[in-house]
Amino acid sequence: MSDIAPQPAPRAPRASRWPELSVVVPVHNEADNLRPLVERLRAVLAKEVASWEIVFVDDGSRDDTLGIIRALNAADPRISAVSFSRNFGKEIAIAAGLDHAFGDAVVIMDADLQHPPEVIPAFLEKWREGYLNIYGQRTDRIGETRLKRNFAKAFYRIFAQFGETDLPEGAGDFRLLDRKAVDALRALPERARFSKGLYAWVGFRSIGVPFEVAERAHGQSKFRYRKLFSFAFDGLSSFSTVPLKIATWSGAIIACVATLSAFYFLLRTLFYGTDLPGFPSLIVSIMFFSGIQLVSLGMIGEYVGRIFAEVKRRPLYLIGERVGFEARTVDHPR
Ligand code: UDP
Ligand code: MG
């Protein structure tokens, strides 16, 4: 197969005043992880690229995260940050990171060292071969509960069946994007951002690089089950209209059944008269139909809510402070 598959053109040698690689890291209360992360990144980047920068996005941390970032920036101006006015969520933080990254390529990674910096050389190798959208593929899900793992599996299965975009198995936010893919992502205006879907949607020459997820270094995961459920629903509803179709079809089927049974009861009463008051069946059917109606209304409501959020056209995020961006133009990074 490799003989037939079109081979991407290798990258031309660089001649640019921008850093070759930006590393975008969303952080929310990660004070203990920042220094170890920067040390490990520095060791890898020094060997692998001509020039680099690290862009932290402080997503409304309440611990000393911002203070540590300021200290890191004072020691090394290649480390910069934007700090949100409050917690906007990881997806939005990534979007802000991409808006502030100057590199020819951008790596997105978590701050908790679950995404090992040592995988970045493998990403870079693929990038230099000409791939533009290189995603880390989890080979396992160590450190996650069985429930979370099964939940993820079920989600991917449902998404593969009904979603409008193919999500590669095990691909997460840990990835390298070429400038072209970054600019494409930045041009997507939606507020409900399901980035896994967006990365796949923009396309470009993509390839996976397997890696083993490490255990979280310090602190604990910020994603509780309720948040994961709403995240999954966000994903499904922004990339498919299946929830709406389920409502429509179940409504239609039940309406048919109801019409048929109405005829049946009518005929039976005409020919045999009433023998039973029929009270229980009445109550059961009323409950059944009101249940269906509420579910359908709820689903429509979810979409209307999303439309509302989009039409308000609020800014995606608000920045409280920029660290290390004074000397650069931030409104039009490139
Ligand atoms: N994160 C964030 N905003 C949030 C929650 C998390 O920026 O509201 C960051 C967090 O600091 C970390 C990354 O997103 O760098 C992944 O978070 P976490 O490790 O809690 O998620 P998990 O690994 O359990 O999916
Ligand atoms: Mg984590």
Image (spheres, rainbow, N blue to C red):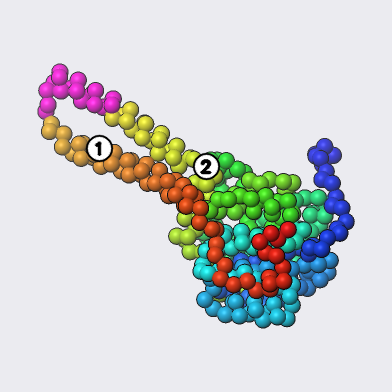
Q: CA distance from mark 2 to mark 1?
A: 31 Å
Locate the N terminus and report the quarter of the image it occupies. top right
Locate the C terminus and report the quarter of the image it occupies. bottom right
Residues at marks 2 and 1 touching, judged by CB atoms closer than 8 Å:
no
Q: For the residue carrying disc 2, how many other residues have a C-alpha within 10 Å: few (<14), some (14-19), or many (20+)?
A: some
Task: Name the residue type under label 2.
Answer: Ser
Confirm if mark 2 falls within 8 A of ligand 1: no
Specify the segment rendered in magenta.
Answer: 259-275
Q: Which residue is mark 2?
A: 240
Disc 1 on helix, strand or loop?
helix
Q: Is residue 52 above or below residue 272?
A: below
Location of residue 332 in the rendering, given as x and y in whole percent from the top left corner: 69, 59
Residue toward you, 55 or 282: 55
Residue shown at the point (67%, 64%) measured from the top left = 330
Residue 135 can be seen, yes or no: no
Question: Image quarter for residue 271?
Answer: top left
Question: Image quarter for residue 265?
Answer: top left
Residue toward you, 178 or 40: 178
Relative to residue 298, is residue 18 drawn left or right?
right
Q: Which residue is mark 1?
A: 285
Magenta: main secondary structure: helix
The verdict on residue 195 being magenta is: no
Foreground: disc 2 or disc 1: 2
